[in-house]
């Protein structure tokens, strides 16, 4: 007898929450196109992508473009825009992706309220920036945003593909699971065992090494006389390889500026952390 | 004729002392210089030749008379000890040995004269006691040497032996052709360019080598003897028989001409090393053409001092060999599996901890 009304209330609450969320989602999607970049269909498709990702990662997501940073650095503008457009809102985490055409820099900013731990590690943010770079460089901005959203979802939901890489399972130096620690120790152990086995066998061989002296010992007057010496240049062969700019190494050596890992206490007791890169 | 240097004081046998560089009598302490003894030895020889040129014949029966073939290990020679008269059986190539009965040092003059007479000798610089000391020190060396080695090994035999060597001088005329590359990198646009510059390298050179040694004894393994090199040639002395008193000595098994092939391989290798030294500034060099003409300009028969210690550890035989002049060592130390495993475990643990920390940071 008691269960029925509670069940009804819960169901009713859920219904209204869904409806409200749906409505607020519709109006709250933060696609702010200050640079007037998006065509209508592009904006629509980004909007629905953002909505999907938001749901899956449980944090607010905003995509902001500007061609006037109002004299601010990209980082400062990102944080200003975060507050100004009320991304996240009170006590909710959020991620803002800024395409700043004034400073020619794109930027990922993560906000966490009240000392919550950041979820995007420096390494993860750098690889996201790396993945986005080719599209930014080519002017494929819509695709750049899609790549950002995909990367964000992967990072925030700890997709299995990322767990394979030992570096991925640590966020801000905190192990995310015991299994991950096991993996790290296991792989270290395996590598160490192989290296040690090689080292020990080399040392065993070296203990009983044979070393005949070099021929120079028997050289008369310790020198030889060179009668003729010719070094003739004949030709040059050339090979070329495309620089992979979407790998961390390639991207970093491409000379693009990056500003990484900056912290700022937000107004509501939260903090920002982000990084960007020139394009 | 078999020589045995008698002490002028008490008549006991005298042996060469590597520390004092004189012949010493162990009983009364009398010391005689090598020069003095070999002078006497010459006089004595001349006298005997004048008196009766066959005087030594009854003392030394020829090898062919009493040759013993021991599993093809070579001819044996029988003779009588000049000290106690007991019969001695030695290998045909032995030039110096000891009487098995009275322990007197004996020198087979016949194996050291005529064309078998060495031109020079490097006398022992390291005495027996020092050789043993260095061996003991060496057994404690090495990361994987069993800790029980210096307590439980058995020293079977310690031998100071003069090993026959041929020394060769070579004059080499050589021409080399080689292909060399240099590499440049360049980044242009989205591409990384690797330019390889190719060069044709030519060298013509004359190289002279002096006193390249080659072990002329069948008994001593060539690789081991090579590893005892180099000998310090400033210690080369004119050959005199008294140096051999108290040591073993072999005369050559191989003639200088027989060993030439082996030496010429070394000469070619050394010449190429020299040529490569002049091909600098390249990322890679591969020699494509070589015309090496070695000319043997001098050949010299010498005796070099070598200590060998045979020891057994856990029923396995090991040999320790040492240059009797410079102390350079060649030997195989037993490897303790336990120690190797311990090192392996220790290294693995350390690396694992380090790697884990690096990844966590
Ligand atoms: Zn005496
Ligand atoms: Zn005797």
Image (tube, coloured by chain):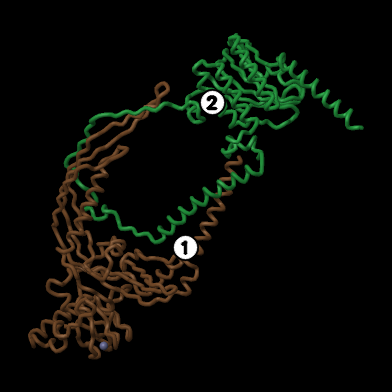
Chain colours: A green, B brown
The chain that hosts pointer 1 is B
Residue B10, percent across and down?
Answer: 28, 89
Residue B45 percent across, percent down from the top left: 13, 82
Left or right, residue B106 beside residue B322: left
| Mark seen at residue A253 | none
Residue B283 seen in render? yes
Q: Quadrant of residue B194?
A: top left
Residue marked by disc 1: B144
| Cα distance in 3D space between marks 2 and 1 | 51 Å
Label 1 within 8 A of ligand 2 by Cβ: no
> Residue at left 28%, top 40%?
B285
Name the residue: 59% across, 28% down.
A125
Q: Which residue, as the protein is rendered here, is positioned at the far bottom?
A: B85
| Viewer-closest of B172 and A79 | A79
Is residue B66 shown left or right of residue A74?
left
Q: Is mark 2 within 8 Å of ligand 2?
A: no
Residue nearer the viewer, B128 or B27:
B128
* Labelled disc at residue A131: 2
Compared with residue A68, is residue A210 higher up or lower down, i.e. above or below?
Answer: below
Q: Chain of mark 2?
A: A
- Give the label, 2 or 1, closer to the camera: 2
Question: Dot 1 surroundings within 10 Å: few (below 14), some, or many (20 or more)?
Answer: many
């Amino acid at each position: 007898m008691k269960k029925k009304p509670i069940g009804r209330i819960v169901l009713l609450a859920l219904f209204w929450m869904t409806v409200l969320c749906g409505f607020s989602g519709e109006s709250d999607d933060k696609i702010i196109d200050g640079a007037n970049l998006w065509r209508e269909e592009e904006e629509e498709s980004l909007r629905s992508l953002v909505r999907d990702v938001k749901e899956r990662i449980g944090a607010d997501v905003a995509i902001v473009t500007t061609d006037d940073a109002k004299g601010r650095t990209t980082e400062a503008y990102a944080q200003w825009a975060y507050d100004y457009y009320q991304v996240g809102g009170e006590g909710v985490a959020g991620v803002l992706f800024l395409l700043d055409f004034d400073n020619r820099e794109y930027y990922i900013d993560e906000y966490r309220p009240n000392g919550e731990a950041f979820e995007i590690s420096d390494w993860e943010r750098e690889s996201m920036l790396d993945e986005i770079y080719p599209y930014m460089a080519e002017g494929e901005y819509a695709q750049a945003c899609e790549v950002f959203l995909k990367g964000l979802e992967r990072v925030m939901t700890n997709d299995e593909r990322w767990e394979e890489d030992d570096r991925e399972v640590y966020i801000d130096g905190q192990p995310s699971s015991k299994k991950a620690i096991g993996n790290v120790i296991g792989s270290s152990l395996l590598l160490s065992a192989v290296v040690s086995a090689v080292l020990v066998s080399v040392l065993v061989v070296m203990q009983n090494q044979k070393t005949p002296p070099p021929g120079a010992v028997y050289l008369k007057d310790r020198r030889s006389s060179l009668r003729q010496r010719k070094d003739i240049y004949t030709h040059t062969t050339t090979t070329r390889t495309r620089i992979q700019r979407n790998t961390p190494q390639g991207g970093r050596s491409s000379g693009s500026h990056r500003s990484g890992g900056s912290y700022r206490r937000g107004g509501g007791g939260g903090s920002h952390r982000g990084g960007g890169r020139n394009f | 004729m078999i020589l045995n240097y008698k002490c002028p004081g008490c008549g006991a046998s005298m042996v060469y002392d590597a520390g004092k560089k004189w012949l010493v009598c162990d009983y009364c302490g009398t010391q005689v210089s090598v020069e003095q003894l070999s002078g006497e030895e010459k006089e004595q020889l001349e006298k005997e030749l004048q008196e009766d040129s066959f005087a030594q014949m009854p003392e030394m029966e020829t090898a062919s008379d009493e040759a013993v073939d021991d599993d093809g290990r070579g001819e044996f020679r029988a003779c009588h000890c000049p000290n106690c008269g007991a019969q001695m059986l030695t290998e045909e190539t032995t030039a110096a040995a000891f009487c098995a009965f009275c322990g007197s040092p004996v020198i087979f003059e016949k194996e050291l004269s005529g064309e078998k007479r060495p031109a020079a000798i490097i006398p022992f610089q390291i005495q027996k006691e020092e050789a043993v000391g260095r061996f003991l020190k060496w057994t404690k060396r090495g990361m994987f040497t069993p800790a029980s080695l210096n307590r439980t090994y058995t020293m079977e035999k310690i031998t100071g032996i003069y090993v026959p060597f041929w020394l060769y001088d070579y004059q080499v005329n050589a021409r080399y052709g080689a292909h060399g590359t240099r590499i440049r990198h360049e980044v242009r646009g989205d591409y990384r360019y690797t330019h390889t510059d190719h060069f044709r390298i030519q060298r013509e050179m004359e190289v002279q080598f002096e006193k390249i040694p080659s072990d002329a004894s069948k008994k001593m393994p060539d690789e081991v003897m090579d590893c005892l090199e180099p000998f310090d040639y400033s210690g080369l002395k004119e050959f005199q028989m008294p140096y051999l008193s108290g040591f073993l000595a072999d005369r050559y098994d191989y003639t200088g001409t027989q060993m030439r092939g082996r030496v010429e391989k070394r000469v070619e290798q050394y010449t190429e090393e020299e040529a490569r030294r002049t091909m600098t500034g390249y990322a890679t060099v591969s020699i494509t053409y070589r015309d090496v003409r070695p000319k043997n300009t001098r050949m010299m028969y010498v005796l070099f001092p070598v200590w060998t210690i045979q020891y057994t550890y856990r029923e396995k035989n090991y040999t320790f060999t040492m240059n009797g002049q410079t102390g350079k060592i060649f030997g195989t130390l037993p490897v303790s599996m336990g120690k190797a495993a311990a090192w392996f475990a220790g290294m693995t643990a350390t690396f694992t901890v380090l790697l884990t920390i690096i990844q966590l940071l």
